Image (spheres, grey):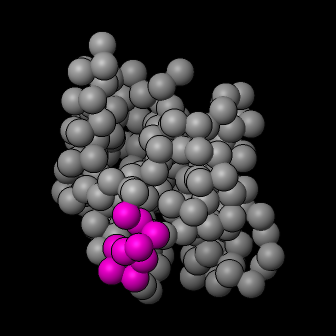
Amino acid sequence: MKLIILDRDGVINQDSDDYIKSVEEFIPIPGSLEAIGKLTRAGYTVTVATNQSGIAHGYYSRATLTAMHDKLIRLLQVHGGGIDRFFICPHGPDDQCICRKPKPGLFAQIADHYRQPLAGVPSIGDSWRDIQAGSTFGVRAMLVQTGKGARALAQHADDLKAIPVYQNLSHAVNTLLAEDITAC
């Protein structure tokens, strides 16, 4: 199985330091839906690993989060794309859970669910914690400059030297798919 792991806010949809709290605030980043469509058509199983501490803070409910994801799935259908599964950490930063990135719990759930090692699996995020979370499993980390990506690059430049950086999800996916073709 060709698996890929995407962060959500800042990679697929616009991010906000005030949280994405409603379906109306869930706005795809230009090109992200088309990129996920390309991944799906290329045979990738697309999964999302996302911190959603807005639930713990009471900014939105699980039902609202589900509605946001339903919107994403509907929008993706137009582009021939899909998300196989969402792996979510609903906890706040002080909850001491093992699933909140940068801890590796979401990635452990993904490995367990798909019953495959994650070494070399592409993982695209927009933050240093996205990169850290997958490192335990040897994922192929990629950083996008959308969302908090530019800030992460500025704050963690030395740590990110070995990580490829892309303008956005579309650019990362186009590069990944071009490599797939070359490898055939």
Q: Residue at x 41, y 73 (%)?
A: 158
Q: Position of residue 1 (x, y in %)?
A: 53, 21
Q: Is residue 74 left or right of residue 93?
A: left
What is the quadrant of residue 103 in the picture?
bottom right
Q: Residue at x 62, y 66 (%)?
A: 101
**Residue 46 appears anywhere in the view:** yes
Q: Position of residue 165 (x, y in %)?
A: 29, 58
Q: Is residue 24 left or right of residue 64?
A: left
Q: Residue at x 79, y 69 (%)?
A: 97
State the extent of the magenta-drawn residues as a range.
153-161
Numbered marks: total: 0
Q: Is residue 39 left or right of residue 127?
A: left
Q: Position of residue 160 (x, y in %)?
A: 41, 66
Q: Is residue 138 left or right of residue 38?
A: right
Residue 136, placed above or below residue 92: above
Q: Position of residue 184 (x, y in %)?
A: 30, 13
Residue located farthest toward the right when viewing the structure as drawn: 96
* 155 in magenta: yes
Q: Nearer the viewer, residue 179 or 34?
A: 179
Residue 131, placed above or below residue 151: above
Residue located farthest toward the top when viewing the structure as drawn: 184
**Residue 16 appears anywhere in the view:** no
Q: Residue at x 37, y 43 (%)?
A: 74
Q: Nearer the viewer, residue 56 or 98?
A: 98
Magenta region, main secondary structure: loop
What is the quadrant of residue 132 in the picture?
bottom right
Q: Nearer the viewer, residue 31 or 111?
A: 111
Residue 106, placed above or below residue 73: below
Residue 99, placed above or below residue 93: above
* 176 in magenta: no
